[in-house]
């Protein structure tokens, strides 16, 4: 009887893991020993109007928010080889050593390491001094305070590079699949006009998670200018970086062959001492000609009530 | 064969197979990641230095890796210490006179920065609370945290002559010693002295000319750091700090070990004796923007001295 019960538990545990495994399967065979941005290859296709064509599934290295290696890069640390890394914002070398072959990590150690690895970069927004303690406390208490931890949209700029871009003459479609695991967020999409229209006055907008975005080209760079946000998101996965409804975000997308580089500059004069620009992120085009975005599983937060410490996950 | 025996045998074979596989895997991992060691094997001292610095960094929990959510990816370990906050209480000695104090230090290694807030007990309030900040070559005193960044919010008083002594405090902290020793490459020497491992390294940047000597205990923790200013000019950069009672002092546990007792001496006399209450080593949000009046003062000072 006991073994039957044990089997049931094991099967139940396996069933819980299956959806995550299915989602990760496509990239689980992708063995990387570095997280440095990929070098571009191939030519940059262009649309009939001469602009670079950004259309495609941009998850060749997995979703840019998913997995510790991508998150380390997002936070501004480039691991360039097995014995060389650097802080992207300052160029400062970071000591790098082979893994300790005699000491494996248990889950707790891996989680603690992941929390640190995602915070080590120096590129941090500079808040007004009266908010320094608040940001620190938000970060310390992120398990409860992070507004995206309860299956809410990640918002902009936290969502980073969309996993799918559809480019049309007068608008763009961006799709950001929802995530589970380290980040539990809802699927998000944006329909962004590129027809020369101007922003609605800020005071006439009701704040939303993705705001009011309009796009234009500056040379070969697509610039997406967004305001009209609510204040219910943070602008990164770590750090407790909150913002006000007065946030204004300018994103820049530049395609080079099979790579897409993204940065976002955040202005928020209510809380920031100065504008902050994210560390550039580079996505790789999914190499499969028939690449599709799989359906995201419904986000259902079940872990939070079981959290007993302030350790981050 | 009785069924029980057969099950036992199968189990033993499975365990043995798992053990062999595990060992083979571990050995392969060792081979795959031992490139740096192999390169340095010919140069005996270089190899020892790399191993000793690695062991000292590992003792502190500085070198970490994790591949959560990334399938077959296997990144090397990197130094994860950047920002840190230390809360302590103890005794501060001013010209030999002891005062009990509360101590809070915020530090960052990229860029090198430190803010030390000390509240002495007793005496008049104005002279008892100090906030001394440094970022790279800028040093200033703050009337409140973040003073001088927003008009009307506190006063930032330039204190450029103090920059080197304040930066020294950052680099003689155990993590700073390891970082500086790794950065100094083959200028860092390791030796055995009286049965203890000793690391000797030159500091760099504005602290060029200062040599630090760190002593390790049997668990590879740094227990003592001494500095010596080799330049001809007189300075206050010669100091001695003892570290003990290493543990994870974080409210959020990080597996980073920090000293629980810190004793600093100058010319053999104590200047600071601290018991650590809390260390936030989870790279907390700590920033050190330089107030505009401090930058202006530094520029004026540099032009007065011809840029030196």
Image (cartoon, rainbow, N blue to C red):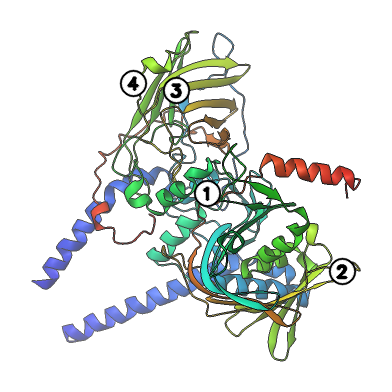
Query: Between residues B166 and A174, which one lies in front from this camera angle?
Result: B166
B229 to the left or right of B103 = right
Residue at the disc numbered 2? B234
Tell me, yes or no, whether dots 3 and 4 are on the same chain. yes
User: Mark 2, residues whose alpha carbon is within 10 Å: few (<14), some, or many (≥20)?
Assistant: few
Residue at the image point whose x is 28% and y is 46% from the top: A19
- Any mark on residue A227, and which? 3
Residue A100 appears in the figure: yes
Q: Position of residue A13 (x, y in %)?
A: 23, 58
Q: Quadrant of the N terminus of chain B?
A: bottom left
How far apart are the alpha carbons under marks 2 and 3?
57 Å
- Residues at discs 1 and 2 in contact (Cβ within 8 Å): no
Of labels 1 and 3, earlier in sequence is: 1
- Any mark on residue A72, and which? 1
Chain where mark 2 sits? B
Of labels 3 and 4, earlier in sequence is: 4
Q: Position of residue A292 (x, y in %)?
A: 38, 30
1 vs 2, front mark:
2
Depicted A150 relative to depicted B253: above or below:
above
Query: In terms of secondary structure, where does tag 3 sit?
Result: strand
Tell me, yes or no, whether dots 1 and 3 are on the same chain. yes
Residue B257 appears in the figure: no
- Any mark on residue A242, and which? none
How far apart are the alpha carbons under marks 1 and 4?
34 Å
- Any mark on residue A206, and which? 4
């Amino acid at each position: 009887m006991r073994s039957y019960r044990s089997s049931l538990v094991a099967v139940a545990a396996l069933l819980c893991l299956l959806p995550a495994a299915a989602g990760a399967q496509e990239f689980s065979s992708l063995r990387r020993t570095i997280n440095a941005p990929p070098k571009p290859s191939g030519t940059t296709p262009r649309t009939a109007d001469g602009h670079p064509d950004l259309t495609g599934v941009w998850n060749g290295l997995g979703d840019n928010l998913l997995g510790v290696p991508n998150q380390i890069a997002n936070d501004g640390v480039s691991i360039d080889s097995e014995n060389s890394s650097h802080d992207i914002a300052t160029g400062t070398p970071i000591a790098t050593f082979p893994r300790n072959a005699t000491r494996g990590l248990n889950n707790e150690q891996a989680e603690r390491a992941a929390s640190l690895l995602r915070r080590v970069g120096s590129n941090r927004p500079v808040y007004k001094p009266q908010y320094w303690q608040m940001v620190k406390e938000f970060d310390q208490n992120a398990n409860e305070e992070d507004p995206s931890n309860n299956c809410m949209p990640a918002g902009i700029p936290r969502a980073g590079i969309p996993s799918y871009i559809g480019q049309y003459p007068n608008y763009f479609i961006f799709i950001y699949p929802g995530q589970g695991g380290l980040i539990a967020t809802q699927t998000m999409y944006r329909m962004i006009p590129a027809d020369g229209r101007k922003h609605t006055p800020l005071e006439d907008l009701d704040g939303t998670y993705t705001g009011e975005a309009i796009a234009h080209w500056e040379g070969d760079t697509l610039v997406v200018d967004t305001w009209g946000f609510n204040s219910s998101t943070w602008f990164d996965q770590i750090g407790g970086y909150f913002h006000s409804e007065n946030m204004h975000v300018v994103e820049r997308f530049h395609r080079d062959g099979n790579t897409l580089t993204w940065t976002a500059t955040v202005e928020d004069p209510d809380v920031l001492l100065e504008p902050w620009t994210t560390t550039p992120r580079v996505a790789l085009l999914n190499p499969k000609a028939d690449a599709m975005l799989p359906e995201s599983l419904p986000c259902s937060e079940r872990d939070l009530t079981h959290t007993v410490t302030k350790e981050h996950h | 064969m009785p069924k029980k025996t057969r099950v036992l045998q199968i189990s033993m074979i499975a365990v043995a197979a798992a053990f062999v596989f595990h060992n083979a895997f571990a050995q392969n991992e060792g081979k795959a990641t031992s490139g740096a060691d192999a390169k340095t094997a010919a140069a005996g001292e270089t190899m020892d230095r790399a191993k000793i610095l690695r062991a000292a960094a590992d003792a502190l929990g500085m070198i970490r890796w994790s591949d959560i959510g990334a399938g077959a990816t296997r990144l090397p370990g990197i130094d994860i210490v950047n920002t840190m906050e230390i809360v302590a209480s103890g005794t501060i000695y001013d010209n030999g006179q002891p005062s009990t104090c509360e101590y809070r230090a915020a530090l960052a290694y990229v860029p090198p920065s430190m803010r030390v807030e000390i509240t002495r007990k007793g005496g008049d309030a104005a002279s008892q609370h100090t906030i001394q900040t440094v970022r790279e070559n800028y040093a200033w005193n703050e009337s409140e945290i973040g003073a001088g960044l927003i008009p009307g919010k506190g006063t930032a008083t330039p204190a450029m002559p103090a920059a080197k002594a304040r930066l020294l405090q950052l680099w003689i902290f155990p993590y700073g010693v390891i970082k500086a020793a790794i950065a100094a490459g083959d200028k860092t020497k390791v030796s055995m002295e009286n049965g203890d491992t000793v690391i000797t390294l030159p500091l760099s940047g504005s602290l060029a000319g200062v040599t630090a000597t760190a002593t390790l205990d049997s668990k590879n923790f740094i227990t003592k750091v001494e500095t010596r200013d080799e330049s001809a000019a007189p300075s206050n950069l010669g100091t001695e700090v003892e570290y003990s009672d290493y543990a994870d002092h974080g409210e959020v546990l990080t597996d980073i070990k920090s000293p629980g007792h810190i004793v600093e001496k100058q010319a053999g006399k104590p200047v600071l004796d601290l018991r650590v209450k809390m260390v936030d080593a989870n790279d907390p949000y700590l920033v050190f923007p330089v107030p505009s009046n401090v930058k202006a003062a530094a520029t004026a000072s540099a032009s007065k001295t011809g840029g030196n």
